[in-house]
């Protein structure tokens, strides 16, 4: 079969691939965008957007538990129409997918946007499913990731649900075991529990939501554990009951459920790419070594962007990595780009957050911790959401803000403020000089920062620490 030649081939039309395409276009290179599977991006189709839609429904319904206390009558008569809620989620999802497609691949000809899986057959050449070969000077590999389902569980068929299937469900089962309490398990586990599903949460680890600070982890377990049982520190075994339901056993605990929600993490889509044909070194996970500032694999004309590299599997990072990979694939000279301050948000209620350096990654005795519990915070009390804790970290000597982990209502907003300040290399002294309105959740952050300020060595000049003196 004839071989087609282009300057750049981008494999994968998710967020990373589309952002790469933008940069390759600007460089006026001849390119193809090759995508196997459904177009429209993981984020819009089965990720960020539909998950936030169902979380919103669940949170709105859950709010009724506070109505009596607030003097609002009739809350107990409110009912969930689950099929309708799932339909609403799908409607929003379709809208988001349409928007992605109409802003990107809908404008491309079939020659440029090729909807097939690609596999390397030799360095510089990929083969498509129909046998067509494409030779490119440079490749951006942006093939994303897939939910992990242990091989033995596949025998249970559609009783094992991942996010690839969840948003297609017409109704929710009466009971579900959520196995894996990272981001997805907590977000969707809490949402379906609030919609009336009897949920049991299970994780191999003693830590949930990716939190590493023991105090914050304790708070997260306490808050989430009030809504459904958490079995931590043990793997789960699944067996079939005579009635076709599934028994899940973890250590001493055992429960029979209708379905299992598998949220054990995601694996990079590298297995069907034929990387073995490229003569590049792969790590034990099968991922090539690459430079996170250039996205280049060694000194090969190959760039690895987005979830496929398993480094920062979140949307804005996939976008940035796509831009870097696309820029470098479109230019002769390789440029390195600074990466953004790490930010991880679990959209549970309250939010579970890690920003900047994680507690576990900080060197003992090099840093101080400022803490504020959410219980007495005025705005949180008014919202009926006064649960959680904020822990901020700063360098003991310089007072430079390093990171934070927290369980907090509106934590998504607090986390952004902190990420911006960390990226600007601000000190805790500088932060306490910023304005804090009353009564807002930021006051909880102010209290944590003030307690941190008193512990670090670097102090603000002038007689009042919170105010910059003019002379
Ligand atoms: C349930 C869920 C909720 C999430 N929520 C959030 C959130 O709230 N905030 C956030 O920041 N992030 C969130 N994420 C993560 C975010 O969605 C991802 O980081 C992002 O979508 C990754 O984009 P990508 O371009 O790397 O991959 P994708 O969008 O998955 O694109 C990869 C594409 O490559 C295709 N492909 C695979 N193999 C081949 C091949 N051999 N040849 C050709 N094409 C191939 C795939 O079919 C796919 O279309 C969530 C993820 C999930 C699953
Ligand atoms: N809000 C967000 O930004 C958001 C939301 C959803 C997903 N995502 C992205 O999607 C990715 C995947 O999410 P995820 O929640 O599936 O993965 P994760 O890595 O966050 O969590 C997986 C969890 O499964 C547990 N686990 C692994 N094997 C297990 C086993 N055999 N038995 C029991 N527990 C087991 C792990 O200990 C971990 O807690 C995340 O890395 C995240 O970046 C982001």
Image (spheres, grey):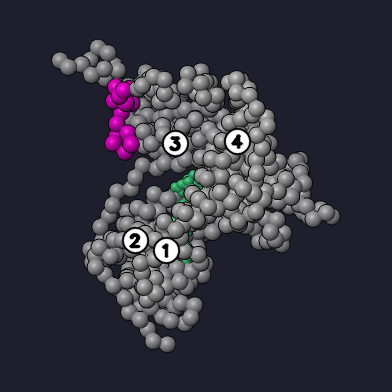
* Inter-mark Cα distance, 3 to 1: 28 Å
- 471 vs 221, left or right, is left
Tell me which label, 1 or 2, sits earlier in the chain.
1
Q: Which residues are magenta?
A: 420-435
Q: Secondary structure at mark 1?
A: loop
- 322 vs 165, left or right, is left
* Inter-mark Cα distance, 3 to 2: 27 Å
Tell me which corner region of the image, top left, top right, bottom left or bottom right, holds residue 404.
top left
Tell me which label, 3 or 4, sits earlier in the chain.
4
Circle nearer the viewer, 4 or 2: 4
- List x then y, in percent, for residue 305: 39, 59
Query: Residue 422: within the magenta?
Result: yes
Does any atom of ligand 2 lie closer than 8 Å to the CB of label 3? no
| Residue 257 vs residue 237, the one in the foreground | 257
* Inter-mark Cα distance, 4 to 1: 36 Å
The residue where tag 3 is placed is: 412
The residue where tag 2 is placed is: 20
Please tell me the numbered disc located at residue 13.
1
Does any atom of ligand 1 lie closer than 8 Å to the CB of label 1? yes
Please tell me the numbered disc located at residue 262.
none
Tell me: residue 91, above or below residue 402.
below
Pointer 1 local density, CA inside 10 Å: few below 14, some 14–19, many at least 20:
many
Badges 4 and 2: C-beta atoms under 8 Å apart?
Answer: no
The residue located at (44%, 36%) in the rendering is 412
């Amino acid at each position: 079969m004839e071989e087609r030649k282009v300057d750049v081939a981008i494999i994968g039309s998710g967020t990373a691939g589309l952002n790469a395409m933008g940069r390759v276009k600007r460089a006026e290179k001849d390119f193809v965008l090759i995508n196997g599977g459904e177009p429209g991006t993981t984020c819009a189709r089965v990720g960020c957007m539909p998950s936030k839609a169902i979380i919103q429904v669940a949170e709105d319904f859950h709010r009724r538990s506070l109505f009596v206390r607030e003097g609002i009558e009739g809350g107990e008569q409110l009912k969930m129409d689950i099929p309708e809620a799932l339909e609403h989620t799908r409607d929003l999802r379709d809208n988001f997918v349409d928007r992605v497609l109409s802003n990107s691949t809908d404008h491309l000809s079939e020659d440029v946007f090729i909807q097939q899986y690609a596999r390397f057959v030799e360095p510089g050449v990929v083969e498509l499913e129909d046998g067509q070969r494409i030779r490119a000077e440079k490749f951006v590999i942006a093939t994303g990731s897939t939910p992990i389902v242990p091989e033995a569980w596949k025998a249970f068929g559609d009783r094992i649900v991942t996010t690839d299937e969840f948003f297609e469900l017409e109704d929710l089962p009466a009971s579900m075991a959520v196995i894996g309490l990272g981001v997805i398990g907590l977000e969707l586990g809490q949402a379906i529990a609030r919609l009336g599903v009897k949920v049991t949460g299970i994780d191999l680890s003693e830590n949930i939501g990716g939190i590493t600070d023991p105090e914050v982890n304790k708070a997260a377990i306490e808050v989430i554990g009030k809504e459904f049982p958490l079995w931590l520190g043990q793997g789960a075994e699944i067996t079939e009951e005579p009635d076709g339901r599934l028994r899940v056993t973890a250590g001493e605990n055992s429960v029979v459920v209708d379905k299992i929600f598998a949220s054990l993490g995601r694996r990079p889509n590298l297995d069907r790419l034929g990387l073995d044909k490229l003569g590049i070194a792969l790590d034990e996970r099968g991922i090539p070594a690459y430079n996170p500032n250039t996205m280049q694999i060694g000194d090969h004309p190959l760039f690895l962007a987005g979830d496929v590299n398993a480094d920062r599997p979140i949307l804005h990072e996939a976008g940035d990595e796509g831009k870097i990979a696309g820029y470098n694939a479109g230019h002769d000279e390789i440029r390195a780009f600074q990466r953004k301050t790490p930010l991880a948000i679990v959209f549970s209620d309250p939010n579970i957050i890690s920003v900047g350096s994680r507690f576990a990654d900080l060197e003992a005795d090099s840093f101080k911790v400022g803490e504020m519990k959410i219980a007495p915070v005025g705005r949180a009390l008014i919202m009926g959401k006064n649960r959680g804790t904020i822990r901020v970290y700063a360098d003991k000597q310089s007072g430079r803000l390093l990171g934070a982990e927290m369980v907090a209502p509106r934590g998504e907003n607090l986390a952004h403020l902190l990420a911006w300040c960390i990226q600007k290399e601000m000190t805790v002294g500088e932060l306490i000089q910023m304005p804090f309105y009353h009564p807002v959740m930021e006051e909880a952050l102010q209290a944590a920062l003030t307690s941190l300020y008193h512990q670090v060595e670097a102090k603000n000049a002038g007689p009042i620490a919170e105010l910059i003196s003019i002379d």
